[in-house]
């Protein structure tokens, strides 16, 4: 073995050389990740203190970047959170793995304390300047402004240019980065997609943002209630490894093993001790002190625990947005035609509590491209209310969508792929322990249990949607049938009469007969539509599906719209006219260009 | 079918429909179901015949478009019959477009592509149980180029005159049979021993140029892939009028056997109503036979997994063995065995591989063919 000097590096040194692992793999992603980390910190801080968040975001180009094909970008995020004490500022923005949330088992957005320090490092590496912070807590008279830089060698944050300034906010933090990057607004990795997604799963968020030269966009909150973040629960013993288990025992001071087990874990009670003994544990070990317990005794305890069947972990630590609030929030996505929201009861997947919420909406703006050739549905993925925007194909949520047979709900879907059409699928996964595939938290690991749980939620949403889609199909079917009567009846009778050289009398009689015949078909179609309408009404009444109300002008029927399908038939069959009136009333949702019959009817009226 | 039958049948059909409509009854159009599940094979007859299944189209809101289109196209075809004009399917498609253009009220009948009008023409044929040629709608005369020094063809022309073609006077130019072979009469100037149908048009041409017809009292024909109506009808005519043995020489692969040879010998499921005139049940499969590969040490090669067409043909072969009444019948056991061999060995051998036997002798394939005929080495 060659004699080489072994050196140690700091965590900051490691991350500064491997920023691609935490979301800074390209200039475009650098801008998005910086914004994302700043917003996550702000929202977490607000929710911890029960403050309803108000964020202001500004992103602009301020020059050319030092890296080829990049711009110098200024990103500013201001919040109304509790503010940071000045001594915490270097830790939060300049030190890696300094976090108030690490391993606490809560459903917070940030966990390890890497993201925002990585953003400071990126800014420092590309523009030679760290993060500019303004902070003010309730107890501070004036705000403090400073520049934080990362001391890469020692993994510490350094404060520079510290001064007090007056700030017209009672409390909050403003963070500003100047860094090299590229701005992408639209598309899956776009800033607007990210901001819309954040607004969707944070109904209590008031968001204002100004991107480049565009006007300020305001997204108002739809709920005034700050979500209750459930308290963390103790870990479940079956989720631990032996080394972890022994290390965990030292956190509870000089206490007995039984006390440590009861305090340190969930789902362990006096009764379970008896089970441990049944599985071969020496009862004496339970009563001895933790610091007197040897590693082999810990191993005995550990194996007895694993042999014993314990209750599944509690799902109390999982928070949900709720169907009502989610329903309000989804309308902020754009002009929504109709949607279904499903909030599943929290459950256990891979021994971890998980809650899945689904919103599937059809957007009006892209309705025209529905069909086989239309692009795949838009998938919005959220993990602990943070949008995930990259590497979607390997994600548990996308895999779950692909396994559902959407065709049975009336949505077009190529084989083994995402469905297509003007739909948005928003899937929110909340859990204190989300298993990401990478450190940049872009993809959720697709374990079988998790995919199945998401799949079930999607099926529920699909069933709710299908009631509306089926109703639409029936309406379209009826409309098509009416159109067929109008178009083909005279042609068919004319052709037959020409070939047989039939007199006018026969032609008239045949036309009457044909109208009667086809009128019966329309009646059948109407019955089917009535059935679909009934199901749809039931679903609507139960709140399982929501239709965004249309403007009055769109829904009101004019007398002209209720004219019979073909004026020629109006004299001959009252039956069809009555049905047609009823049908037109039901199918008028789609406004169409006036048909020949309407024009003829108008002429006739005149 | 007699020329005046179609107009009469059409008028009767339209009259029936009108009468039904007058009394508010649903008119029904009925046609023979032309599909494999309605195909029967009687070894005594030798070709696929229709079963009892019929396709019924009852007039309702969903079918009113199809019925209107059928009557609309029927009117065009009747006009053609009346004036004696003939058209191809594509021309009918454009004629229908022209009708719509000049009469906007017919707009809803407009076809978006030719396949739509083609299926309507086929539906009319199935309904009337006639050939499209009976409706003056002709297909392009493809394949069937024939060479012989003994054959004389007499064609009855529509104007009542006759045209006599002595194939020996054509030199190396072929005689091209028509899609309506019923108007042709065949006569042999001298005894003809056999008729050889070669799958590849190019190889048939090579044989003629090398003097096949000079050395043999035979009819030589190029099939040019899947036999067209012209080839099928022409072979039937040779079989019926000359009563000579007919041999088919083609590739040894699943496609040739189930698509080309079966269509020539027993017709197809899609043309059940006209197989009686468009199939030659006496035609025999001369080769390439699986045993020829060893016997003549022919160059064969494995079926490539990534060749979609070949892979599909092999997959179809296993279905055919289970479902096709032609291959299921005892009479065609030999042919079914070849299909089984192909499925098992996944190899194929082309007709041109006979040229490998003696690369310096251009007549070697002909010699092998004649030898096989003499020895009765065919199925």
Image (cartoon, rainbow, N blue to C red):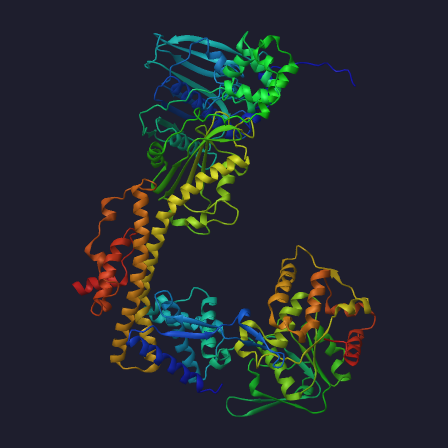
Q: Is residue B326 above or below residue A410?
A: below
Q: Is residue A404 above or below residue A509?
A: above
In the image, what residue occupies the spot 39% across and 24% down? A57
Query: Which residue occupies the extreme left position in the image?
Result: A606
Quadrant housing the N terminus of chain A: top right
Residue B103 x, y percent position in the rendering: 33, 71
In the image, what residue occupies the spot 45% across and 65% down? B113
Residue A180 placement, left or right of B203? left
Picture mark count: 0
Residue A430 x, y percent position in the rendering: 45, 29
Camera-nearest residue between A436 and B82: A436
Q: Is residue B245 above or below residue A312?
A: below
Quadrant housing the C terminus of chain A: bottom left
Residue A147 x, y percent position in the rendering: 47, 13
Residue B109 x, y percent position in the rendering: 37, 68
Camera-nearest residue between B371 and A248: A248
Observer able to see residue A395: no
In the image, what residue occupies the spot 42% across and 71% down? B56
Q: Quadrant of residue B18?
A: bottom left
Observer able to see residue A225: yes
Residue A213 placement, left or right of A490? right
């Amino acid at each position: 073995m060659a004699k080489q000097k072994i050196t140690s590096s700091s965590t900051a040194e490691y991350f500064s050389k491997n920023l691609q692992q935490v979301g800074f793999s390209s200039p475009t992603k650098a801008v998005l990740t910086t914004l994302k980390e700043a917003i996550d910190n702000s929202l977490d801080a607000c929710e911890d203190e029960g403050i309803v968040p108000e964020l202001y975001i500004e992103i602009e180009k301020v020059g050319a970047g030092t890296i080829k094909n990049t711009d110098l970008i200024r990103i500013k995020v201001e919040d109304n959170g509790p503010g940071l004490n000045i001594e915490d500022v270097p830790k939060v923005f300049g030190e890696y793995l300094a976090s108030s949330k690490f391993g606490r088992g809560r459903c917070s957005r940030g966990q390890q304390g890497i993201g925002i320090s990585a953003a400071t490092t990126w800014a420092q590496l590309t523009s030679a300047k760290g993060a500019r912070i303004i902070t003010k807590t309730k107890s501070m008279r004036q705000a403090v402004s400073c520049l934080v830089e990362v001391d890469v060698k020692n993994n510490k944050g350094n404060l520079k240019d510290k001064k007090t300034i007056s700030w017209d906010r009672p409390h909050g933090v403003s963070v500003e980065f100047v860094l090299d990057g590229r701005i992408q607004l639209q598309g899956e990795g776009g800033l607007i997609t990210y901001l819309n997604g954040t607004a969707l799963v944070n109904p209590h968020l008031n968001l204002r943002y100004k991107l480049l030269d565009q006007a300020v966009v305001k997204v108002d909150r739809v709920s005034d209630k700050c979500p209750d973040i459930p308290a963390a629960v103790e870990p479940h013993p079956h989720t631990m490894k032996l080394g972890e288990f022994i290390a965990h025992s030292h956190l509870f001071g000089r206490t007995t093993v039984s006390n440590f087990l009861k305090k340190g874990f969930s789902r362990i009670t006096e009764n379970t001790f008896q089970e441990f003994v049944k599985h071969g544990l020496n009862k004496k070990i339970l009563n001895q002190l933790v610091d007197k317990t040897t590693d082999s005794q810990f191993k005995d305890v550990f194996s007895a625990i694993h042999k014993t069947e314990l209750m599944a972990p509690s799902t109390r630590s999982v928070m949900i947005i709720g169907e009502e609030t989610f329903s309000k929030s989804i309308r902020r996505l754009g002009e929504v035609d109709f949607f279904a929201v499903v909030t599943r009861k929290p459950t256990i997947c891979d021994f971890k509590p998980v809650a899945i919420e689904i919103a599937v909406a059809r957007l009006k703006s892209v309705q025209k491209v529905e069909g086989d050739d239309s692009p795949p549905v838009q998938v919005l993925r959220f993990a602990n209310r943070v949008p995930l925007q990259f590497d979607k194909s390997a994600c548990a949520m996308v895999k779950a969508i692909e396994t559902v047979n959407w065709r049975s709900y009336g949505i077009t879907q190529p084989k083994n792929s995402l469905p297509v059409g003007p739909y948005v699928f928003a899937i929110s996964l909340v859990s204190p322990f989300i298993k990401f595939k990478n450190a940049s938290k872009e993809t959720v690991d697709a374990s079988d249990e998790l995919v199945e749980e998401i799949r079930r939620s999607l099926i529920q949403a699909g069933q709710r949607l299908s009631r509306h889609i089926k109703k639409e199909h029936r309406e379209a079917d009826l409309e098509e049938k009416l159109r067929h009567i109008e178009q083909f009846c005279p042609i068919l009778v004319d052709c037959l009469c020409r070939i047989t050289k039939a007199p006018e009398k026969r032609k008239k009689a045949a036309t009457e007969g044909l109208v009667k015949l086809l009128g019966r078909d329309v009646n059948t179609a109407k019955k089917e539509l009535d059935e679909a309408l009934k199901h749809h009404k039931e679903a609507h009444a139960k709140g399982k599906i929501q239709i965004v109300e249309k403007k009055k002008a769109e829904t009101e029927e004019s007398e002209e719209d209720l004219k019979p399908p073909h004026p020629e038939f109006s004299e001959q069959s009252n039956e069809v006219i009555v049905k047609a009136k009823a049908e037109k009333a039901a199918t008028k949702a789609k406004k169409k260009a006036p048909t020949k019959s309407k024009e003829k009817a108008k002429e006739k009226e005149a | 079918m007699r020329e005046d039958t179609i107009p009469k049948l059409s008028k009767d059909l339209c009259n029936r429909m009108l009468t039904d409509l007058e009394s508010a009854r649903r008119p029904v159009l009925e046609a023979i179901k032309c599909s494999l599940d309605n195909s029967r094979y009687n070894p005594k007859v030798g070709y696929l015949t229709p079963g009892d299944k019929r396709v019924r189209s009852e007039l309702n809101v969903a079918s009113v478009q199809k019925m209107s289109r059928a009557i609309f196209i029927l009117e065009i075809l009747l006009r053609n019959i009346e004036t004696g004009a003939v058209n191809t399917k594509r021309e009918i498609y454009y004629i229908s477009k022209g009708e719509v253009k000049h009469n906007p009220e017919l707009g809803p009948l407009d076809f978006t592509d030719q396949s739509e009008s083609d299926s309507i023409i086929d539906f009319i044929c199935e309904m009337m149980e006639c050939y499209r040629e009976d409706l003056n709608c002709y297909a392009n005369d493809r394949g069937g180029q024939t060479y012989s020094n003994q054959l004389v063809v007499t064609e009855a022309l529509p104007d009542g005159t006759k045209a006599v073609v002595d194939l020996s006077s054509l030199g190396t130019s072929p005689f091209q049979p028509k899609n309506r072979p019923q108007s042709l009469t065949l006569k042999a100037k001298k005894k003809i021993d056999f008729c050889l149908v070669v799958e590849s048009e190019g190889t048939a041409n090579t044989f003629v140029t090398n003097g096949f017809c000079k050395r043999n009292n035979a009819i030589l024909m190029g099939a040019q892939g899947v036999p067209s109506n012209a080839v099928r009808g022409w072979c039937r005519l040779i079989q019926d009028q000359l009563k000579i043995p007919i041999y088919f020489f083609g590739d040894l692969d699943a496609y040739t056997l189930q698509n080309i040879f079966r269509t020539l010998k027993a017709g197809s499921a899609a043309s059940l109503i006209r197989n009686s005139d468009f199939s030659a049940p006496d035609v025999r499969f001369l080769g390439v036979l699986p045993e020829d590969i060893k016997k003549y040490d022919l160059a064969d090669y494995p079926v490539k997994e990534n060749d979609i067409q070949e892979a599909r043909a092999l997959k179809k072969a296993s279905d055919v063995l289970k479902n096709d009444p032609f291959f299921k019948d005892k009479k065609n056991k030999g042919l079914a065995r070849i299909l089984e061999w192909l499925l098992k060995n996944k190899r194929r051998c082309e007709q041109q591989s006979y040229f490998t036997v003696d690369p310096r002798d251009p007549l070697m394939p002909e010699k092998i063919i004649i030898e096989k005929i003499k020895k009765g080495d065919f199925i």
